[in-house]
Image (cartoon, rainbow, N blue to C red):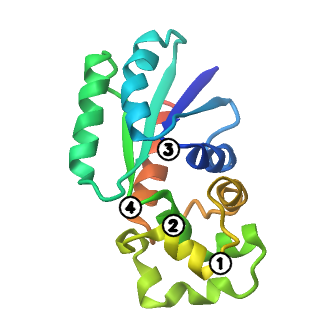
Amino acid sequence: MRRLVVFTEEMSAKVMLESLLPRLLPQEIHIQCVDFEGKRDLEKQLPIKLKGWRTPDTAFVILRGQDSSNCHDGKRNLRKICDAANKPDVLIRIACRELESWYIGDLAAVEAGLEIDGLSASQERAKYRIPDNVISPSKELKKITKNRYQKVGGSRVIGKHLSLDNTRSVSFRNFVNGVRRITAQPDG
């Protein structure tokens, strides 16, 4: 059996991925999501987790938010950690700016998950067309859902409805394509 292990900086990403990844991957791939308590905790514990992982035929993904930092610097730092742990093939993806950018890019999923009628009609508004550019997506999501969005609970129900083919958020598209690529069966 093949295994995909995804390290996330927070519980909300973990619960979203637990409902998204089974729809993305073949059933024979075992999925394990490991959450940490923020970026610092992720970066501190990541070397230990990677070095200690002994299960063969495992692919690794790290998903973390950009927030206000430079995404290239964050990715470079994580790459150094992976290389030092002798795991150079880890897929590193940064959600620009926050995980909630992915949700803003798919307001139909938010509408379905949170059961808010008519929310998807706002998708074509200029500020939601390129969700990775929204400065504070979590605040924006709370605002447009009238505080019905809560990080963990909201992520759990929205993840079930996120369209795997949604291309509004470049960081979401890169995550989906990257996971598909590293879990693809080699030809032969």
Residue 5: quarter of image: top right
Q: Which residue is mark 1?
A: 145
Q: Give the spatial CA distance, label 2 vs label 1.
A: 11 Å
Identified at 54% across, 84% down, the residue is 123
Q: Give the spatial CA distance, label 3 vs label 2.
A: 27 Å
Q: Earlier in the sequence, mark 3 or mark 2?
A: 2
Q: Nearer the viewer, mark 3 or mark 4?
A: 4
Disc 3 residue crowd, few under 14, some 14–19, many 20+, Cα 10 Å: some
Identified at 57% across, 79% down, the residue is 143
Q: Which residue is mark 3?
A: 180
The amino acid type of the residue labelled 3 equals Arg
Cβ–Cβ under 8 Å for marks 1 and 4? no
Q: Residue 94, image x and y in percent?
A: 37, 50
**Image disc number at residue 138:** 2
Q: Residue 178, image x and y in percent?
A: 42, 45
Which residue occupies the foreground of this view, 125 or 167? Answer: 125
The amino acid type of the residue labelled 1 equals Thr
Q: Which residue is mark 4?
A: 97
The amino acid type of the residue labelled 4 equals Arg
Q: Is residue 41 left or right of residue 118?
A: left
